[in-house]
């Protein structure tokens, strides 16, 4: 049973018909004021709800005199008697809609200026204005619902893990800068001139060291920092559930995480599309969906038609396959009537993601019930090839088949982007469901063309598959990792892996990534030394609290579920940060600001 905190007043969401006759005091903000030519009605709001107050001059002239000067967002204290609303004026859509409070006394605790936007109106407001006046934006019902959902998510996480013997342990915010993927935020040291702390991108190495320390089930609600370009599901600082376990395999972590997410979805009205969550290999996800974070709420799958068109008279297809590339296709339902201008726009869209061009077939019914197609390339395709392409993609009369002939990774990316675009445009995703899946069997390494070296696809502490370790000597690109991502509605909401716990294998990983021994010792020596003292096998996962809250709240950006987010330019417009600091502070930190050199045009 929940314990209610003692208050000297009644909240605005708790009065019911059974409270009639009670004398109460409520405190809150004026949500709305209505003057009915004598009677004044005030709707008083706090985060618990809203209560209607009636101010009658015949009942209390003093209260009425105060109410005449009250406006929206004034902070009020109201003392009065609860009574049933007159018959026919009840509001069944409000929890307090059966009662009202007849005011005996009103006290203005604080007046308010006219707000730059309506608090009690859910209409759209420019985001920059909302962020500048975030303290007002957070009064709005939608934002309060989002913050309460986020609170419930974190509370559920803690309860779920506490019940399973996990220990919550805090790790430092000021740490050593090590290469882990994104750019670090650096903090200069006053006492060590020219040296810097880094804000953690994640507590990755610290949680592994905690496994060495024998804390076999660790978690924390961790603040993390990454200096990277912004987008709707990224922020410079974010929150993740950091979780690590000893003596486990991938199956243990998947089972634990699925159970947690099922409970989190239970906080909402969403239904889960499939349990247990489907599992896709990385190769399968890229082939069928063109993405390692596919939205499975709809089909629209990609088909590989390379074998179908390998001997085609259409040279673009035949040459692509002969050169080691692929031809892949997707059928868009009901878009067979697209105009040439619309198809040209799709071609431009595809080229943004690396495609050289975009072939298309508008499927039609031919003579005698045969399949036909409207397209510049239709004359180069045999009836059998056309039929096989349509059947492979699931296309039918009235659909538009889009084809990409290129390297496998380019074809996957382009068609994956087109799949996401049409899934959104056609409203194919059921908005009432959540669709989870696991993506597994990732490659351990990817080739970094810029630096001409192998780089870890997740992070360098991820263990290779046992049966693939031998390939580290002969075919690094073929080595699979013990990594796993959990995907929800097309967003990666958590990533993890079984970690390397062997000192020699971990050193070898750093060497394969091109690190010299001196660099390895300087940046990772602390971890490697710890592994020499009996590191247990271990693994973990780090679901993103912000992304989970964003999806379960039905929002499109993380900014809608964070109390004080940065804008799309990574600025805090309420505090106007980042900003200049006093020269004295810079001097104490041994820092001199140098203006960036800007190249002159021409």
Image: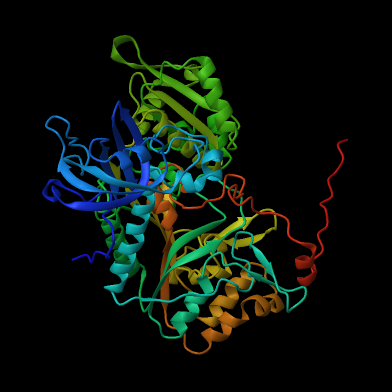
Q: How is the image coloured?
A: rainbow
**Residue found farthest to the bottom:** 533
Q: Is residue 232 above or below residue 176?
A: above
**Percent position of residue 551, x then y:** 38, 47
Q: Is residue 357 visible?
A: yes
In this view of the protein, which residue sits in the foreground, 148 or 115? 115
Q: Is residue 532 above or below residue 522?
A: below
**Quarter of the image where the N terminus is located:** bottom left
Quarter of image, res 578: bottom right
**Percent position of residue 312, x then y:** 49, 27
Quarter of image, res 323: top right
Say which residue appears at 54% left-offset and 82% top-offset: 503
Say which residue appears at 58% left-offset and 37% top-offset: 353
Q: Is residue 305 visible?
A: no
Quarter of image, res 90: top left
> Relative to residue 156, is residue 197 drawn left or right?
right
> Relative to residue 437, is residue 577 drawn left or right?
right
Count of marks placed on residues: 0
Q: Is residue 514 above or below residue 389?
A: below
> Relative to residue 85, is residue 274 drawn left or right?
right
In this view of the protein, which residue sits in the foreground, 17 or 269? 17
In this view of the protein, which residue sits in the foreground, 62 or 8? 62
**Percent position of residue 602, x then y:** 88, 35
**Percent position of residue 423, x then y:** 39, 33
Say which residue appears at 38% left-offset and 80% top-offset: 216
In this view of the protein, which residue sits in the foreground, 457 or 542? 542
Say which residue appears at 46% left-offset and 58% top-offset: 442
């Amino acid at each position: 049973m929940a314990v209610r905190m003692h208050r000297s007043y009644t909240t605005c969401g708790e009065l019911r018909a059974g409270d009639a006759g009670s004398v109460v005091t409520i405190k809150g903000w004026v949500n709305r004021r209505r003057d009915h030519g004598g009677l004044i009605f005030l709707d008083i709001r706090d985060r618990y709800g809203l209560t209607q107050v009636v101010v009658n001059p015949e009942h209390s002239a003093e209260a009425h005199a105060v109410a005449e000067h009250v406006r929206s967002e004034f902070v009020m204290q109201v003392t009065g008697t609860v009574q049933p609303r007159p018959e026919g004026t009840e509001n069944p859509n409000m929890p307090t809609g059966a009662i009202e409070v007849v005011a005996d006394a009103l006290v203005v605790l604080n007046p308010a200026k006219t707000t730059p936007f309506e608090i009690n109106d859910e209409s759209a407001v420019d985001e920059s204005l909302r962020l500048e006046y975030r303290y007002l934006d957070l009064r709005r019902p939608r934002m309060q619902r989002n913050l309460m959902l986020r609170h419930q998510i974190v509370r559920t996480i803690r309860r779920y893990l506490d019940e399973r013997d996990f220990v919550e342990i805090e790790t430092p915010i000021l740490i050593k800068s090590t290469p882990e993927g994104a750019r670090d935020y650096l903090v200069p040291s006053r006492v060590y001139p020219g040296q810097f702390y880094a804000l953690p991108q994640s507590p990755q190495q610290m949680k592994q060291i905690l496994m060495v320390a024998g804390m076999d089930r660790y978690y924390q609600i961790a603040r993390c920092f990454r200096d990277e370009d912004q987008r709707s599901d990224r922020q410079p600082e974010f929150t993740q559930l950091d979780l690590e376990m000893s003596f486990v395999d991938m199956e243990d972590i998947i089972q634990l995480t699925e159970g947690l997410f099922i409970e989190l979805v239970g906080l909402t009205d969403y239904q889960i599309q499939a349990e247990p969550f489907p599992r896709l290999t990385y190769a399968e996800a890229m082939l069928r969906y063109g993405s390692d974070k596919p939205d499975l709420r709809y089909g629209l799958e990609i088909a590989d038609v390379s074998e179908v068109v390998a001997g085609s008279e259409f040279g673009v297809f035949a040459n692509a396959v002969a050169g080691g590339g692929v031809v892949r296709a997707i059928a868009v339902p009901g878009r067979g009537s697209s105009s040439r201008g619309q198809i040209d726009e799709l071609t431009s869209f595809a080229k943004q993601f690396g495609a050289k061009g975009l072939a298309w077939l508008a499927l039609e019914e031919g003579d005698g019930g045969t399949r036909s197609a409207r397209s510049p390339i239709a004359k180069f395709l045999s009836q059998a090839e056309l039929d096989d392409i349509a059947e492979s993609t699931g296309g039918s009369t009235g659909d538009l088949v889009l084809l990409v002939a290129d390297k496998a990774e380019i074809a996957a990316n382009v068609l994956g982007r087109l799949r996401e675009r049409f899934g959104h445009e056609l409203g194919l995703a059921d908005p009432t469901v959540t669709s989870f899946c696991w993506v597994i069997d990732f490659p351990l390494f990817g080739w970094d063309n810029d630096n001409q070296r192998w780089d870890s696809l997740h992070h360098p502490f991820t263990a290779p598959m046992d049966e693939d370790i031998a390939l580290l000597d002969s075919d690094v690109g073929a080595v699979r990792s013990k990594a796993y991502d959990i995907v929800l509605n097309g967003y990666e909401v958590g990533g993890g892996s079984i970690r390397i716990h062997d000192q020699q294998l971990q050193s070898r990983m750093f060497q394969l990534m091109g690190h010299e021994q001196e660099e390895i010792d300087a940046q990772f020596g602390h971890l490697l030394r710890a592994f020499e003292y009996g590191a247990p096998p271990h693994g973990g996962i780090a679901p993103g609290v912000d992304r989970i809250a964003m999806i379960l709240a039905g929002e499109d950006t993380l900014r809608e579920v964070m109390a004080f987010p940065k804008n799309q330019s990574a600025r805090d417009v309420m505090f106007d940060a980042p900003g200049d600091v006093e020269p004295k502070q810079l001097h104490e930190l041994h820092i001199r600001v140098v203006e960036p050199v800007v190249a002159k045009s021409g």
